């Protein structure tokens, strides 16, 4: 073959926009979104709490600290969060130790069961505890025949422990699997006893991971709304007090003040967690882990039994709610029925799917599926949009921060990571204050809910995008550019296909959060705009506990169905590393 | 005049660090040029400025008579081969090679034809449907090479392309790159820290150190006539002695050598350099009488290392270590063994002189 005919000339590739301009535009857009939908609402809360009739004053704070009942919500919150943090961190640490450092059988099952609380609204723990230990609880009324019930601090703590367990476990599991086990072996070969090795080697090596898990649990507990609202009874915490003041008493100023007070511990715990996670990762060695020595029989038994304890609790929670939705009158009449799935007329705005079902179905089915299930269709619809929007925006943010690194990249990073520090209830109230104005056309529609859920969960989405993009070699992109590809082509043909799996698991994460989130969104729903997770609370408040269980069950099945579908699409993509916040 | 690439006063600073320090170079069309230097010498930074991935702090990059400092990488039409191959893992061999053609919106038939030509160049036609992960490192780098060549770039830039490969494959691929370059007459700029690679492959070698050029020239000239003690040390191996010059004699701390090369510089303090293969080794009582007696020094063989065709001896000469490479046949004939006392002979014409106070 004549080689010279290979040397024909080709046209120059075309580039519409320069790379830097495009990066600038995208970054400007993201900064604007984060500023407008995150900073502005928080700013509005601070403004309202520090001003009284247009004058700078601390009157609201004086009100807060002199009203004993409201003030108690602060000490209550701190107490509950502190106890939960201690219990959960210790429980999760030994669980993680069992999964990473022993050779117990059934690790996969333990791990899977421990992730269950992530697929349901946090409220499920509360519902289950009421079914078992409430005024008409199976255990309290039937087995023990006592008047004692779990409402109040005990209930909140137990429920939060279950809810936070998988989140703490993820961090501790990562920490313990990353710390080099050869250190332990070296210590033991030098004659240290097993217990001494644990105290002197294992524990110090995992200290940042432990502290970071503790900070995360503290943050999750002190900001959670779902659990205390159903099981707290008269025991008021900051998150529920905000809702109480705003929705119950129309005291927006006091709600804002409590929000600012809640921001302090939650931002503090977030910063601590963030700082410690970085420290913890710095300790992780890239060394491959050597073969794990078979554990002694006693150790194996002890850890197997231990690991079953939280798993059984979690299973009991899910089974009780599931059963509770199918039996006639818990705990008196256990005959099966579907009547609780015939929800009271929830009405609500009829988006896309409601109209669709109404046109397809006839008679009673039309009323059940189309209208009574309206909040479920709404939730699905919202969740799909949140999944697409959230995964896309966080991928873009991660791409700019990790790969493009323009000037001001640090600002974008900070804004993207910050939402996890802001409690959902605070964000929800902030949205009311900031956007309840006639010219914000999106207020009172689904759009504000979609935006709110995306922003509230931006942190984890961005961090996982960044972690994934880090794995793409810089020269791969440069190769595409040097071959003449413009920025858009480089992104769509090279970068995106390489992050596809992470993108899908981010979509799963956002979908899950949208289906289960309560705290922020509860401020944004209205008679016309209803969501399934919120309906659980209203059904429960209405005394329709069984229907609340039914609604919860439906949500779980939808989330599980979506996760299975994702697994079919991507081949993998589990729950790993998807702790909510 | 062809489409030459010219670097004028080119400088790159990262904060206070001067990575590339006012360099000038003219690269002719079709030339194969190699940037050689230790890591951190700035050679890759020069390459990245030429590609457009790094901005220029000062000076000019001129291609075909036009300053291209501010031209975006896509517009420069330079192909790049990376150390890490950087093949798109989500695309087959064929799709990888076709990528640069597709973004140029070429017709399907033209792309197919060109991809065939390219795969034939490296004999990988049968591998077209495989993914990069299914190929060995050497095969991946060959694909990366033709992927960069497919859009017919004006210049091909190779950034340590063989460093990640095994020694044997490295030598084979080196020959293949050289063959391609000679067939296509494509201007190639090749960055490496491997002096053997640079010397064997390039038309011209640029030796860099601390952001500056130390020597530019044909491989043979660089090896035979290193312009400085740094080059003499970095390119190949050299023995060095520090001494005072007095006419044709150099007095070092312990010895006095006769040299026949007259130095082109003034100044009494000098470095004497001599290549290991120039240092001759004799058993005691062996050396012929006609040798310059002052350059004949006794020592003891400390270390013997087989290099294949040659044997490297480390000889302790009154406390100073001298390296001598002896061809294997000679080593056997003379029965040189470790611990043996020997005579070393430094031929006066084999010494190269450098000023002791070099501009570092």
Image: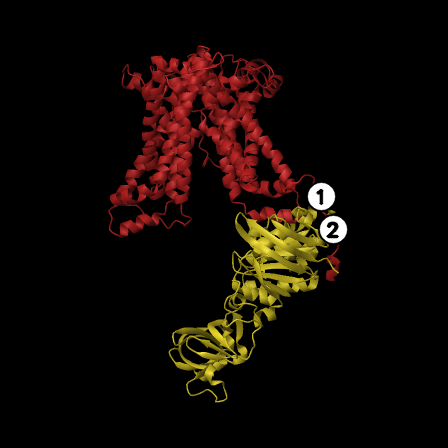
Chain colours: A red, B yellow
Task: Verify CB contact (< 8 Å) between mark 2 and mark 1.
Answer: no
Q: Quadrant of residue A253?
A: top left
Observer-nearest residue: A22 or B139? Answer: A22
Which circle marks residue A396 in the picture?
Answer: none
B358 sits to left or right of A321: right
Query: The numbered mark 2 sits on a residue in which chain?
Result: A
Is disc 1 surrounded by few (<14), some (14 to 19) or many (20+) residues within 10 Å? some
Asked which quadrant contains residue A553, the reply is: top left
Residue plotted at (28% across, 49% down): A187
Q: Chain of mark 1?
A: A
* Neighbourhood count class around disc 2 (C-alpha, 10 Å): few under 14, some 14–19, many 20 upward: few
Q: Residue B8, percent across and down?
A: 65, 55
Q: Is residue A521 visible?
A: no
Question: Could you say which disc has been placed on residue A10 in the image?
Answer: 2
Q: Quadrant of the N terminus of chain B?
A: bottom right
Residue that protrudes farthest toward the top in the picture: A249
- In the displayed structure, A364 sits above or below B34; it is above
B1 or A157, nearer to the observer:
B1
Residue A58 lies left or right of residue A362; in this view the side is left
Across and down, in percent, residue B115 comes to: 69, 53
User: Residue A302: x percent and y percent?
Assistant: 28, 38
Question: Disc 1 designates what residue?
Answer: A14
Q: Secondary structure at mark 1?
A: loop
Question: Eyeballing the image, is A531 above or below A489?
Answer: above
Q: Which secondary structure lies at badge 2? A: loop
């Amino acid at each position: 073959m004549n080689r010279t005919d290979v040397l024909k000339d080709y046209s120059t590739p075309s580039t519409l926009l320069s790379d830097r301009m495009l990066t600038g535009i995208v970054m400007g857009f993201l900064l604007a979104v984060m500023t407008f939908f995150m900073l502005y609402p928080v700013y509005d809360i601070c403004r309202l709490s520090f001003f009284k009739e247009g004058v700078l004053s601390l009157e609201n704070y004086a009100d807060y600290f002199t009203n004993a009942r409201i003030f108690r919500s602060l000490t209550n919150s701190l107490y509950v969060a502190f106890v939960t943090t201690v219990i959960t961190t210790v429980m999760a640490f030994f669980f993680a130790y069992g999964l990473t450092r022993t050779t117990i059988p059934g690790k996969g099952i333990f791990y899977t069961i421990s992730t269950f609380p992530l697929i349901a609204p946090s409220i499920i723990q509360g519902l289950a505890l009421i079914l078992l230990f409430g005024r008409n609880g199976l255990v309290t009324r039937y087995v023990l025949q006592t008047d004692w019930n779990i409402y109040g601090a005990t209930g909140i703590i137990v429920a939060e422990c279950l809810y936070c367990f998988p989140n703490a476990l993820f961090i501790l599991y990562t920490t313990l699997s990353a710390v080099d086990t050869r250190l332990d072996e070296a210590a033991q070969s030098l004659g240290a006893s097993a217990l001494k090795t644990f105290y002197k080697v294992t524990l110090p090596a995992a200290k940042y991971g432990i502290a970071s898990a503790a900070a995360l649990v503290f943050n999750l507990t002190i900001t959670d709304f779902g659990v205390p609202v159903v099981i707290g009874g008269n025991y008021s915490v900051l998150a529920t007090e905000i809702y109480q003041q705003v929705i119950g008493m129309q005291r927006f100023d006091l709600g804002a003040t409590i929000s600012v007070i809640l921001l302090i511990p939650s931002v503090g715990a977030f910063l601590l967690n963030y700082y410690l996670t970085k420290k913890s990762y710095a300790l992780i060695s890239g060394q491959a882990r050597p073969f794990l020595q078979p554990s002694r029989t006693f150790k194996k038994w002890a850890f197997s039994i231990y690991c079953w304890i939280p798993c059984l609790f979690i299973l009991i929670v899910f089974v009780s709610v599931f059963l509770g939705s199918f039996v006639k009158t818990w705990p008196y009449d256990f005959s099966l029925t579907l009547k609780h799935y015939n929800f009271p007329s929830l009405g609500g705005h009829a988006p896309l799917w409601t109209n669709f079902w109404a046109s397809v179905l006839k008679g009673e089915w039309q009323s059940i599926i189309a209208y009574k299930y309206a909040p479920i269709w709404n939730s699905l619809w919202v969740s799909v949009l949140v999944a697409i929007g959230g995964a896309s925006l966080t991928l873009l943010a991660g791409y700019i921060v990790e790969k493009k690194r323009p000037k001001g990249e640090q600002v974008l990073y900070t804004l993207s990571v910050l939402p996890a520090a802001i409690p959902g209830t605070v964000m929800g109230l902030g949205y009311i204050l900031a956007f309840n104005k006639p010219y914000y056309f999106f207020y009172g529609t689904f759009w504000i809910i979609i935006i709110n859920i995306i922003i509230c969960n931006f942190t984890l989405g961005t961090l996982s995008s960044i972690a994934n993009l880090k794995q793409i070699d810089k020269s791969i992109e440069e190769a595409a550019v040097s071959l003449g590809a413009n920025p858009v082509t480089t992104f769509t043909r090279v970068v995106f296909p390489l992050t596809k799996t992470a993108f899908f698991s981010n979509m799963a994460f956002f979908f899950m959060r949208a289906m289960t989130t309560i705290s922020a969104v509860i401020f944004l729903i209205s008679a016309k705009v209803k969501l399934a997770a919120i309906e659980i609370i209203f059904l429960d408040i209405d005394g329709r506990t069984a229907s609340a269980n039914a609604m919860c069950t439906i949500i779980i099945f939808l989330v599980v169905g979506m996760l299975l579908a994702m697994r079919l699409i991507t081949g993998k993509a589990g729950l790993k590393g998807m702790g909510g916040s | 005049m062809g489409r030459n690439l010219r670097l004028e006063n080119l400088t790159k600073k990262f904060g206070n660090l001067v990575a590339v320090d006012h360099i000038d170079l003219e690269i002719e069309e079709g030339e194969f040029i190699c940037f050689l230097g230790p890591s951190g010498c700035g050679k890759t930074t020069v390459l990245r400025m030429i590609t457009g991935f790094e901005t220029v702090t000062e000076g000019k990059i001129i291609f075909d008579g036009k300053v291209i400092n501010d031209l975006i990488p896509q517009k420069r039409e330079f192909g790049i081969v990376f150390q890490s191959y950087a093949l798109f893992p989500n695309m087959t061999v064929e799709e990888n090679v076709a990528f640069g053609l597709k973004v140029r919106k070429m017709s399907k038939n033209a792309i197919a034809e060109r991809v065939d030509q390219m795969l034939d160049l490296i004999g990988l036609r049968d591998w077209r449907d495989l993914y990069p992960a299914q190929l060995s490192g050497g095969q991946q780098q060959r694909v990366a090479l033709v992927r960069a060549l497919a859009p017919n770039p004006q210049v091909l830039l190779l950034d340590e392309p063989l460093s990640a490969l095994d020694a044997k494959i490295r030598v084979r691929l080196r020959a293949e790159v050289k063959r391609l370059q000679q067939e296509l007459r494509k201007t190639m700029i090749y960055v490496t820290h491997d002096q053997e690679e640079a010397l064997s492959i390039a038309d011209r070698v640029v030796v860099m150190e601390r952001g500056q050029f130390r020597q530019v020239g044909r491989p043979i000239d660089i090896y035979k006539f290193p312009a400085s003690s740094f080059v003499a040390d970095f390119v190949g191996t050299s023995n060095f002695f520090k001494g005072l010059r007095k006419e044709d004699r150099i007095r070092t701390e312990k010895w006095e050598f006769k040299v026949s090369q007259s130095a082109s510089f003034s100044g009494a303090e000098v470095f004497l350099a001599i290549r290991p293969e120039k240092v001759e080794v004799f058993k005691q009582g062996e050396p012929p009488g006609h040798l310059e007696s002052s350059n004949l020094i006794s020592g003891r063989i400390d270390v013997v290392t087989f290099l294949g065709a040659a044997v490297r001896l480390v000889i302790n000469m009154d406390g100073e270590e001298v390296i001598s490479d002896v061809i294997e046949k000679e080593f056997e004939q003379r029965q040189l063994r470790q611990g043996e006392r020997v005579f070393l002979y430094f031929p006066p014409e084999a010494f190269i002189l450098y000023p002791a106070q070099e501009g570092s």
